[in-house]
Image (tube, grey):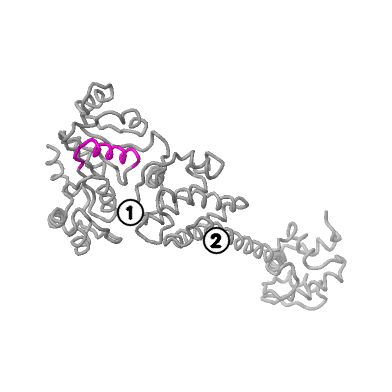
C-alpha cells in the first residue's frame, strides 16, 4: 500500500527520474541505509525540472551531483512526510537491502566458519601435516563451504572425523611429505557406507556428489600429490587407495588369457573365456568368491601392466599371456589379486609408464613382492632413444626412488622424458608370446 500521496507519487514517478531512483537505491544499500554522501547522475530536462520542484531550487540538466542529505530533508518537508530511504523503497519496488550489513554478516560468518575449521583440524591431529595448506587453499578458492550454507559446520566436523579415521590406515598426520604417497594403495579397511555411518551417522554422507565426500577426497588428493578427481571412476580409485572399498562391483581388474588350474566352475569359466579370446573384468565380488582358488600354477609367471591399451594390444595380437591390468593405481581387487599370486609362489612381473606416477605405483607393488618387467634404467634409456623426438614430452613432478633399479631414478631425472607403455608395446607383446 502506497504511503506517498497519489499526486506526489505520480510527480516523482516520471520515467526520466527512474535511473536516478535506481542509483539512489543502490547507494543507500551500500551506505547502510544512511542518507549521506552524494551521487553523480545524468538528468534530462524533465528529470531536472522534477528535482527542482522537490528541492525548491534550480537543478541543472546533464551531469550533476546530488547530495543525499539535502534530498532526504526536502522529502521529509514535502507532502510525502518521509525520508529518502522510505521514498526510494516505495518508488523502486520494496524494502532496500542493507548490503553493507549483509556483507559484514557474511564476513563474520566466514570468519566463524574458518575458526570452526581450524578448531576441528587441530582436534583431528592433522593440523601439522604438510598437505593441509594446499587442501585448505583449494577449499577456500572453490567456495565449497560457502555453498554448504548453514550445514557447513556439520560438514567440517564430519570431514575431519573421516580423515582422522582414515589416518589409522594411512599416515595422513605424518610431517614427512612422502609418507602418505609411500603408504598407498592401502589394504582394504572400510566399506564406504560403513565409514560414512561410523563417522557421519549417515550411510550416504560419503556418496558421490555429497559435500563431505568432496572435501575428504580433496584432502586425499593433496596428501598423495594427485589431481582432484573429476570423474566417478577416479573418485572410486582414490577411495580405494586409502583402504576404502566403494562397492563390490565397480572397481575391476582387467584380465587377459588367465587360465586358473583346477576343476572349480570359476576356473573352468576363466579358461573358457581365455580360449574364446575374451578380456575379463574381475570385480571385488568375484574376487571374494574365488579368493580361495588358485589363479595360476605355482612357479608360473603372470605379467601386469598399468594401461588398458596394453590389454587391447594383447587381445588384438592374441598373445598367450597371462596379463593383468591395474588401469592406473591398483584398485582393491587388483591389489588383492597380486598379493595372492605372490603368496601362492607365482612370479608377478609389472610394467608401467616411465613417469613419476608410474614409478610410485611400481614402488608400492615392488614392496609387496612384485618384480619389474622391462622396467629398469636400461629399458628406459633404450625406449627414450627409440622414440621420435617430435613426439616426446617432458614429465612433471619429482622423480621418486626406484629401489628395484637405483640408476633408473637418476637417468629419468637427466632425460625428463615420459615414456608411456604404448610406446614400447612391441617389446611387451614379444614377452607375452606374440
Which residue lies at the image location 28% right of the left edge and 24% below the top edge?
266
Part of the protein shown in magenta? 331-348
Q: What element does badge 1 sit on?
A: helix
Q: Which mark is residue 87?
A: none
From the viewer's perspective, tell me whether residue 147 is left or right of residue 305: right
Residue 414 in percent (x, y) is at 19, 64
Which residue lies at the image location 77% right of the left edge and 72% below the top edge?
49
Q: Quadrant of residue 110?
A: bottom right
From where the camera sits, is residue 121 visible?
A: yes
How crowded pointer 2 is (Cα within 10 Å; few <14, some 14-19, many 20+) is rated as some
Residues 250 and 203: in front is 203
Which residue lies at the image location 57% right of the left edge and 51% below the top edge?
148
From where the camera sits, is residue 16 visible?
A: no
From the viewer's perspective, tell me whether residue 136 is left or right of residue 292: right
The reply to whether the magenta stretch includes residue 161 is no
What residue did someone put label 2 on? 118
Residues 85 and 243: in front is 243
Amino acid at each position: 500500500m502506497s504511503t506517498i500521496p497519489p499526486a506526489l507519487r505520480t510527480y516523482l514517478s516520471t520515467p526520466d527520474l527512474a535511473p536516478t531512483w535506481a542509483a539512489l537505491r543502490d547507494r543507500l544499500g551500500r551506505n547502510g541505509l544512511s542518507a549521506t554522501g552524494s551521487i553523480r547522475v545524468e538528468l534530462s530536462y524533465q528529470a531536472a525540472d522534477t528535482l527542482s520542484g522537490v528541492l525548491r531550487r534550480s537543478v541543472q540538466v546533464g551531469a550533476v551531483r546530488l547530495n543525499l542529505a539535502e534530498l532526504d530533508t526536502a522529502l521529509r518537508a514535502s507532502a510525502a512526510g518521509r525520508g529518502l530511504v522510505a521514498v526510494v523503497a516505495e518508488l523502486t519496488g520494496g524494502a532496500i537491502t542493507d548490503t553493507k550489513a549483509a556483507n559484514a554478516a557474511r564476513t563474520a560468518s566466514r570468519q566463524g566458519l574458518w575458526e570452526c575449521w581450524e578448531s576441528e583440524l587441530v582436534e583431528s591431529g592433522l593440523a601439522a601435516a604438510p598437505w593441509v595448506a594446499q587442501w585448505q587453499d583449494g577449499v577456500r578458492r572453490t567456495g565449497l563451504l560457502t555453498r554448504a550454507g548453514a550445514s557447513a559446520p556439520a560438514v567440517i566436523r564430519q570431514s575431519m572425523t573421516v580423515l582422522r579415521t582414515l589416518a589409522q590406515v594411512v599416515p595422513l598426520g605424518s610431517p614427512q611429505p612422502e609418507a602418505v604417497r609411500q603408504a598407498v594403495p592401502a589394504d582394504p579397511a572400510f566399506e564406504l557406507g560403513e565409514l560414512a555411518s561410523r563417522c557421519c551417522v549417515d550411510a550416504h554422507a560419503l556418496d558421490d556428489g555429497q559435500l563431505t565426500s568432496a572435501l575428504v577426497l580433496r584432502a586425499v588428493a593433496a596428501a598423495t600429490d594427485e589431481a582432484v578427481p573429476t570423474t566417478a571412476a577416479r573418485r572410486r580409485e582414490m577411495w580405494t587407495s586409502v583402504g576404502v572399498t566403494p562397492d563390490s562391483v565397480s572397481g575391476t581388474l582387467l584380465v587377459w588369457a588367465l587360465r586358473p588350474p583346477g576343476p572349480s566352475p570359476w576356473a573352468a569359466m576363466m579358461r573358457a573365456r581365455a580360449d574364446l579370446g575374451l578380456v575379463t573384468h574381475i570385480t571385488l565380488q568375484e574376487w571374494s568368491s574365488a579368493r580361495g582358488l588358485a589363479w595360476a600354477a605355482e612357479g608360473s609367471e603372470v605379467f601386469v601392466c598399468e594401461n588398458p591399451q596394453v590389454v587391447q594390444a594383447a587381445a588384438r595380437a592374441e598373445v598367450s599371456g597371462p596379463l593383468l591390468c591395474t588401469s592406473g593405481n591398483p584398485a582393491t581387487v587388483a591389489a588383492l589379486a597380486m598379493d595372492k599370486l605372490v603368496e601362492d609362489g607365482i612370479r608377478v612381473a609389472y610394467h608401467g609408464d616411465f613417469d613419476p606416477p608410474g614409478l610410485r605405483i611400481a614402488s608400492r607393488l615392488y614392496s609387496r613382492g612384485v618384480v619389474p618387467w622391462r622396467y629398469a634404467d636400461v629399458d628406459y634409456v633404450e625406449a627414450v632413444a627409440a622414440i621420435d623426438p617430435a613426439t616426446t614430452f617432458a614429465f612433471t613432478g619429482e622423480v621418486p626412488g626406484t629401489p628395484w633399479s637405483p640408476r633408473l631414478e637418476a637417468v629419468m631425472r637427466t632425460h625428463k622424458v615420459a615414456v608411456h607403455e604404448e610406446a614400447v608395446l612391441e617389446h611387451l607383446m614379444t614377452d607375452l608370446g606374440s
